[in-house]
């Protein structure tokens, strides 16, 4: 999905940045920041449990891009390491732009802050601060103490980076992933009733966009009723992206998912069944490619969505795409867990008996007219329309 362009004012720096403005024009710096964001987005959904960071190394005098990289699939090596490795000796005295503060802790790899210093970088422009307590400003402190001028981007660049990194931020601060809720509705705003197989009410262009959302998620989630009604595969079937299918998660309070569902036809991508009582899950114990995550049920026998999100975050999930039916979508919205709601409006109209309201007993106004959401984008997708709403708690137009 489109993101607004970042903007940068070369003289707009943090209080600690009292040196002269950078020798590059604000237009050039803005372009470098946009490139860092673009590069970061290429690996969204492929770097869990780490965030997908973008790093651009550029000549400090001319703005020539020397190297750029995103965090590698699987989360390592980090973007800064890859970009600096590509830049080689030309990194000395250069500028590096990153979408997230460089890490400062020793883990499976040395800290990126150390790598930046060792490479001879002279200037750093960064977007988000890292809320991970192992970093939390220490990366910036380290590079500044070793002669690197660290400059934070303007509000536009920071805003875009913060949104990009929400999954990482939520995982370390709220112990939950970033959640996108996606629904497809007909021209009258109703979702189709399942009849044992998926019912498509949008065209090829919109469905391709939906599959791209899957490729950019760490996990995709539906409820048990969706499995029973639609028997979906929940895979990414875009050419060249079949290996980007996310973990498939099913919410089933009693673990009573049909064992013969298409979800279980293949061992990969794996299927995780989140339940509150696993006593009915004997068919899945020890089954290849299937995990049962018992989080305990409430007194009413229902799943606590926040506990479910905590469990997924503990398993490394940072970005979750919810494709469940009306009750599942409504549950996430009512729980305050929907960070982005994507509505795909089909051009056709269902038979009145074939459709139902998208959010239980509520229509699209639950989101469209709510002060908790703001319309971020609306675009055509062939003959269909895609509307994207973002939570006002984390995004302001």
Image (spheres, rainbow, N blue to C red):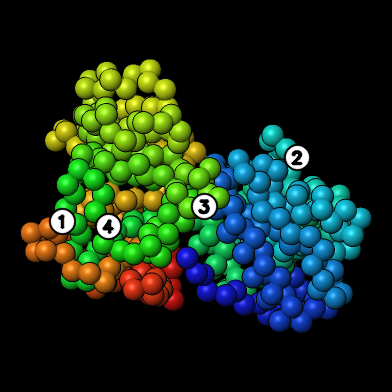
Few, some or many C-alpha atoms within 10 Å of disc 1 (few <14, some 14-19, many ≥20)? some
Residue at the far left: name it.
353
Q: Mark 2 to mark 1: distance in Å?
A: 50 Å
Q: Earlier in the sequence, mark 2 or mark 1?
A: 2
Q: Mark 1 to mark 3: distance in Å?
A: 34 Å
Q: Is residue 42 left or right of residue 104?
A: left
Residue 168 seen anywhere in this rendered image of the structure: no
Q: Identify residue for label 4.
A: 200
Q: Mark 2 to mark 3: distance in Å?
A: 36 Å
For discs 4 and 1, the disc positioned in front in the rendered view:
4
For discs 2 and 4, the disc positioned in front in the rendered view:
4
Disc 4 + disc 1, Cβ < 8 Å = no
Q: Is residue 268 left or right of residue 148?
A: left
Few, some or many C-alpha atoms within 10 Å of disc 4 (few <14, some 14-19, many ≥20)? some
Q: In what element is the residue under mark 3?
A: loop
Q: In what element is the residue under mark 1?
A: loop
Few, some or many C-alpha atoms within 10 Å of disc 2 (few <14, some 14-19, many ≥20)? some
The disc placed on residue 360 is 1
Q: Earlier in the sequence, mark 4 or mark 1?
A: 4
For discs 2 and 3, the disc positioned in front in the rendered view:
3
Q: Mark 4 to mark 1: distance in Å?
A: 20 Å
Q: Identify residue for label 2.
A: 110
The disc placed on residue 239 is 3
Q: Earlier in the sequence, mark 2 or mark 3?
A: 2
| Vertical side of 29 occupied by 228: above or below | above
Q: In what element is the residue under mark 2?
A: loop
Q: Nearer the viewer, residue 144 or 55?
A: 55
| Vertical side of 134 occupied by 297: above or below | above
Residue pictured at 26% horizontal, 49% vertical: 198
Few, some or many C-alpha atoms within 10 Å of disc 3 (few <14, some 14-19, many ≥20)? few
Q: In what element is the residue under mark 4?
A: loop
For discs 1 and 3, the disc positioned in front in the rendered view:
3
């Amino acid at each position: 999905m489109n993101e607004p362009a970042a903007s940068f004012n070369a003289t707009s720096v943090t209080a600690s940045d009292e040196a002269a403005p950078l020798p590059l024009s604000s237009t050039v710096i803005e372009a470098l920041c946009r490139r860092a964001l673009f590069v970061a987005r290429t690996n969204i959904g492929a770097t869990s449990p780490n965030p997908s960071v973008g790093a651009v190394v550029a000549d400090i005098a001319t703005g020539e891009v020397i190297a750029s990289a995103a965090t590698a699939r699987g989360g390592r090596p980090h973007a800064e390491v890859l970009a600096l490795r590509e830049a080689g000796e030309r990194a000395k005295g250069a500028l590096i732009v990153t979408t997230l503060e460089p890490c400062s802790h020793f883990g499976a790899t040395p800290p990126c802050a150390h790598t930046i210093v060792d490479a001879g970088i002279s200037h750093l422009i960064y977007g988000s601060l890292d809320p991970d307590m192992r970093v939390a400003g220490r990366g910036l402190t380290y590079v500044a103490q070793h002669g690197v001028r660290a400059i934070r981007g303007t509000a536009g660049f920071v805003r875009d980076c913060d949104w990009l990194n929400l999954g990482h931020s939520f995982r370390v601060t709220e112990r939950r992933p970033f959640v996108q809720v996606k629904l497809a509705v007909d021209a009258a705003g109703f979702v189709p009733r399942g009849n044992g197989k998926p019912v498509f009410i949008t065209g090829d262009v919109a469905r391709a966009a939906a599959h791209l959302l899957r490729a950019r998620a760490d996990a995709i989630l539906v409820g048990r009723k969706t499995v029973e009604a639609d028997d979906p595969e929940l895979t990414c079937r875009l050419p060249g992206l079949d290996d980007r299918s996310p973990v498939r998660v099913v919410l089933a309070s009693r673990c009573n998912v049909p064992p013969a569902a298409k979800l279980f036809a293949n061992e990969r991508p794996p299927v995780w069944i989140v339940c509150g009582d696993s006593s009915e899950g004997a068919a899945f114990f020890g089954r290849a490619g299937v995990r049962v995550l018992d989080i305990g049920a409430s007194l009413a026998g229902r799943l606590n969505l926040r506990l479910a999100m905590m469990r997924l975050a503990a398993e490394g999930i940072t970005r979750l795409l919810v494709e469940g039916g009306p009750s599942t979508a409504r549950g996430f919205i009512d729980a305050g867990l929907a960070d982005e709601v994507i509505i795909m409006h089909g051009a056709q109209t269902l038979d009145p008996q074939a459709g139902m309201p998208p959010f239980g007993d509520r229509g699209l106004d639950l989101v469209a007219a709510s002060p908790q959401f703001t319309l971020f984008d609306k675009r055509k997708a062939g003959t269909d329309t895609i509307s994207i709403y973002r939570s006002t708690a984390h995004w302001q137009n």
